[in-house]
Structures are given as C-alpha cells and as structure tokens.
Amino acid sequence: MDKGGPIEGRWAGMTTNTTLGRKTALTAVYAERYVLSLIFLYLGWIDLHKFWAGGPGQYGTERALLVEIAHHVIYSQLQIYTGFLLLLGRRAAVPPQNFKDLLVPLATTFFNLTYSAVPWFPAALQKSLCPIGLQTFFAATGLCLNFIGFMVAIWGAFHLGRSFGVFIVVRKVVFDGAYRWVRHPMYLGYICLLAGLAFANFSAAYFILVPIHVSLLLYRARLEEARLSEHSTEYQEYIRQTGFIFPRLRHPGPFEKSGG
C-alpha cells in the first residue's frame, strides 16, 4: 500500500464515488500529516505543562491529584504518541470519499476539548454525585481504568503502526496483534479511558459528555468498516470472524489471513 510515487500519481487513475474532489481529498491527507500531527503534539505538551507548572502539591487532596493525573499525565502521553503516528503515517491508498469521512473523525477526535468547558457548566452539573467517603475510591478506580485504556490503546496503535490516521481512508489493513481478536482495539482503549474519566469525576457533566463521545467513536468505527469493506473482501470475512469493540466470547479463533 505504501509503494509507488507521490500521492497524486497513485490517485490519478482511481475511480471513486468521492464527492470531495481530488484537490480537497489531497489537501485533507496532507493536513492530517503536517497539521493535525502538530496539533496533537502541542496539546500533549500543554497537558503536561498544566500538570507540572504548579507541582502536584497544588491540587490539595489525594482525590484531586488522582483526577489531575487521569486528566493530564496519561492523556497527554496518548496525544503525543498520536502526533508522532500521524507525522510518520503511511500514505492513503484510497482517499477520503466525502465530507462525512472528514467531519465525523474531526468531531470525534476533538470532542476531547469539550471536557475543558466543564468549569463553565452550571454548578449542579459539576458537583460530584459520589458520597464523600467513596470519592477517593472512585477517583482511584477511574485512574486504573485510564491506565488500562491507555495500555490497550497503545497496544492497538503499536500494531496499527503507520496505518494509523484520523480521517477515514484506506491504508494497509492490519490483522495481527490485537487486531486478531477485535477489530477496534484502540477504540476499546479509548472507551476505557472515557469510563475512567467519568468515574474519576462522577458528575452529571461527565455523565452527559462521555456517552456522546462514545457514540461518536462507535459511529466513526462503523464508517471505517464500511469503507474498508468496499475495497477488501478479506476485510468482509474479518468482520464475520472477529468482535467489533469487544472480543467475542465464542468464535472460531483469532482471525487468520488467507494465503496467497
């Protein structure tokens, strides 16, 4: 998938159902590599800077410190890693086909910014709904879910490698590693991260935002599968044999590619 000349040359003879236009699709691919990658690196650095600027002692309580670790330290590492993956990503074999392939991933990816707006929510929505005696426990549970989610997402990203991207395009399809058991291990990791965020804060604001974010993730995953299925019969068989977000309890075994 990554062989051949420039992207323009590889798309020149391709017939697609795109409604974007060739120049728009090409601009999106370059923007993903050279603009979005830098945005992720910058956001990751900002998160780390916010945490360390005043020192851990600024947060006062143990619960507050755990929440801030969940917010900034773990999440910033994922953002920085994402930035490097985008910068080094494999070129698209099939470009974005329509505006949905651009807008849905962007809405999903940058929905994270809505959590920064929580301090502007009404006080009743910001208030923790957890009993005082359990707040530290739930904050610690949230941190554990964040760590598990981070590790699962990194595991998926490691195997996805240079096929990672933001926009919905067709690159080299990965079937090994975490992808032998589940089709979207990175999204499984993200869902764990978001669940950890909800547990750590345990407020109505997060109980509203997190389900919306998860719904966007699942919708994006379905769009990706539809695009890959259009261009790969092997991926169609892969869908029949593997779990969507969670591994199947009963299935023939991890997916094995056909020979050839």
Image (cartoon, grey):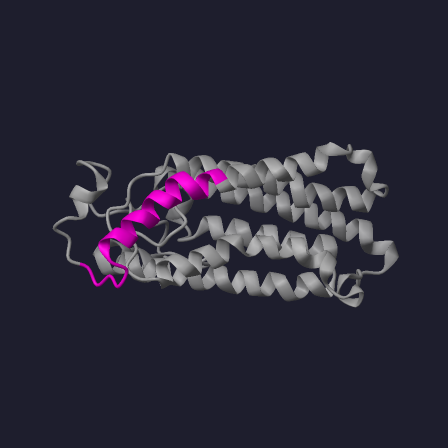
Q: How many marks?
A: 0
User: Residue 236: x percent and y percent?
Assistant: 27, 59
Question: Is 19 colored magenta in this rendering?
Answer: yes
At x 71% / y 37%, what residue is drawn? 51
Determine whether 174 is above or below 15 in the image: above
Magenta stretch prevailing secondary structure: helix
Determine whether 16 is above or below 152 in the image: below
At x 71% / y 49%, what residue is drawn? 141
User: Quick check: 46 left or right of 106?
Assistant: right
At x 28% / y 48%, what residue is drawn? 26
Q: Nearer the viewer, residue 67 or 245?
A: 67
Position of the C terminus by quadrant: top left
Question: Is 48 colored magenta in this rendering?
Answer: no
User: Quick check: 108 left or right of 196?
Assistant: left
Q: Nearer the viewer, residue 146 or 67?
A: 67
Position of the N terminus by quadrant: top left
Res 50 seen here: yes
User: Residue 248: x percent and y percent?
Assistant: 44, 58
Q: Nearer the viewer, residue 1 or 159?
A: 1
Res 246 seen here: no
- In the figure, residue 74 lies in which quadrant? top right
User: Residue 107: x percent and y percent?
Assistant: 48, 59
At x 72% / y 33%, what residue is drawn? 52
User: Residue 214: x percent and y percent?
Assistant: 54, 61
Q: Which residues are magenta?
A: 16-38
Q: Nearer the viewer, residue 73 or 186?
A: 73
